[in-house]
Amino acid sequence: MAAKEADPAGAETAAGGKGKGKRKLLLIALPVVLLGAGAGVWFSGILGGGGDAHAEASAHGGETGGQGAGPKAPVFVDLPEIVANLNAPGRRSSYIRLRSKLEVARAADVATVEGAMPRLLDLYTTYLREMRPEELRGSSGTQRLREELIARANLVLAPARVNDILFTELLVQ
């Protein structure tokens, strides 16, 4: 009989142990989940946090001394037309004619771009002469060309920054 009485007591302590384990897990997991959800809400910008808060504050004149200029308009610099022969195999020559505009980060960078224009055109022409016509086919070829030209411009114009290059004319013959 004593053995029968010991089993129910042992069952109760075992059940109590499981309850305590679940309770501990709940006490640990609940704050972690709440912190994760709070961080997600904060970085999404719903509570005014995250990376966009600074941009919103400056757009509304919060940190700019009340200027309230709104979002900055992009600044574009026209590049002269570039005509270069491509690295085409065989007897037939292929040419590229490129007209483009550089989008710079600040209006103060326009003077830097204009001052470095000969070096920039030299880099662009040299790069274009090494390209094959096949590399320029399709939208993926145009996107690769865009990325390479932006990277080269940022090397030449540092500390000025080029955000994008816009092709106004891209002709491959």
Image: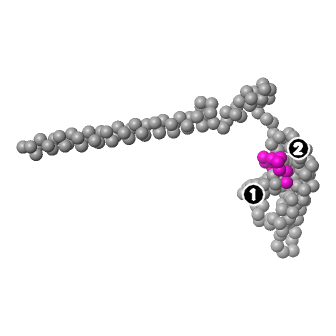
Residue 41 locus on image (x, y percent): 56, 35
Q: Which residue is mark 1?
A: 144
Residue with the most extreme bottom position: 90
* Amino acid type at mark 2: Val
Q: Tell me how the rendering is colored.
A: one colour
| SS at circle 1 | helix
The one nearer the camera, 166 or 8, is 8
Residue 91 locus on image (x, y percent): 87, 74
Where the N terminus falls, by quadrant? top left
Give the residue displayed 39% in from the left and 38% down from the top.
Answer: 26
Q: Which image quarter: residue 111?
A: top right
Residue 85 locus on image (x, y percent): 88, 65
Mark found first going from the N terminus, 2 or 1: 2
Q: Mark 1 Cα within 10 Å, few/some/many (few <14, many 20+)?
A: few
Where the C terminus falls, by quadrant? bottom right
Give the residue displayed 53% in from the left and 35% down from the top.
Answer: 38
The one nearer the camera, 151 or 2, is 2
Q: Is residue 159 magenta?
A: yes
For the magenta stretch, what is the residue range? Answer: 156-169
Residue 28 locus on image (x, y percent): 42, 39
